[in-house]
Amino acid sequence: MDSVVYSRLHSNLAIMKLNTVDSILDSYLESAISEEKSFTEILDYLMDQELKARTASAIEQRTRLSAIPVKKYLDDFDFSFQPSIDKNVVKELRSLRFINNTENIVLLGPAGIGKTHIATGLALEAIRAGFSAYFTTGHKMVEKMKRAAHRDWLDRAMAVYSRPKLLVVDEIGYLPLDREGANLFFQVVSNRYEKNSTIFTSNKNFGEWGEILCDDILASAVLDRILHHCTVVNIKGDSYRIRNRARKMSEGSRKGGSE
């Protein structure tokens, strides 16, 4: 290849930010020529590698921006330990049609049964499918908005929770909200209503949400918007953490007895 053409080619690839093609071009062309690949085959391979790299980079960036604390995938969920969960329901949710239809999901049940795992798994599926997602707990979300409101930054903070195509609000009910916090929670729900999808997890049944929000009327208004287009999954079972703790204690006692 002419040195001027070679130099211009790499320069143009850099200008067009085809970084993957730029990095693999020399080695691939050598093997492609020896294998007598056609121009179309060479171009197809190079473009495919560039697209795969960009897709992976975009997924990585969306995952980082999602604030998901621990990556938990649906493929790793132990459905055999939670037989109350209908696998077909989770399979349908995994299709992500609920996001396209701007529907919500509520996962109810006691602590440690996998609500957060399922919510996180669905968020990661959404990210891989090209949707924006954001993860927070109910308490953290409200506290951040309260601080923002006191500094006249509420619109900016509200946008963080209103814009993502999928918002996960974890642990609703573990800590009660004061009236200001409850009103801010209502604003988030209202802003997202029929615009974007939200996954809520809670250890409280809907009849107890009046206690969480310090107002039965406000709770009714919140639930009316959440449940209008919604799939509710009630999970009944033992805690994974308690099971694992019991298993470790049992293993420890067996080791102690054998020494």
Image (cartoon, helix red, strand yellow):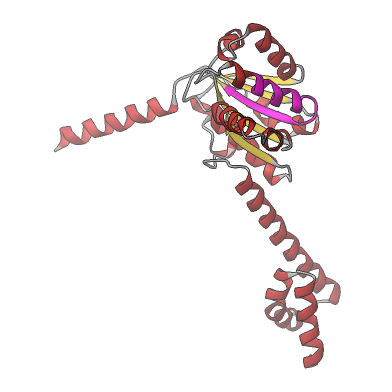
Residue placed furthest toward the left: 259
Place of residue 29 in the rendered image (x, y in percent of width and height, measured from the top left): 74, 80
Decide if residue 36 is in sight here.
no
Identity of the residue drawn at 59% across and 27% down: 142
Judge whether residue 6 can be spotted in this image: yes
Eyeballing the image, is 111 above or below 59? above
Percent x, y of residue 121: 60, 37
Q: Quarter of the image containing the C terminus? A: top left
Q: Does residue 9 sit above or below 91 in this rendering?
A: below
Q: Position of residue 117 (x, y in %)?
A: 55, 33
52 w.r.t. 235: above or below: below
Q: Residue at x 64, y 38 (%)?
A: 134
Image coordinates for residue 219, horizontal then vertical, percent: 65, 12
Is residue 198 inside the magenta stretch? yes
Q: Is residue 189 left or right of residue 208?
A: right
The magenta region covers: 183-201
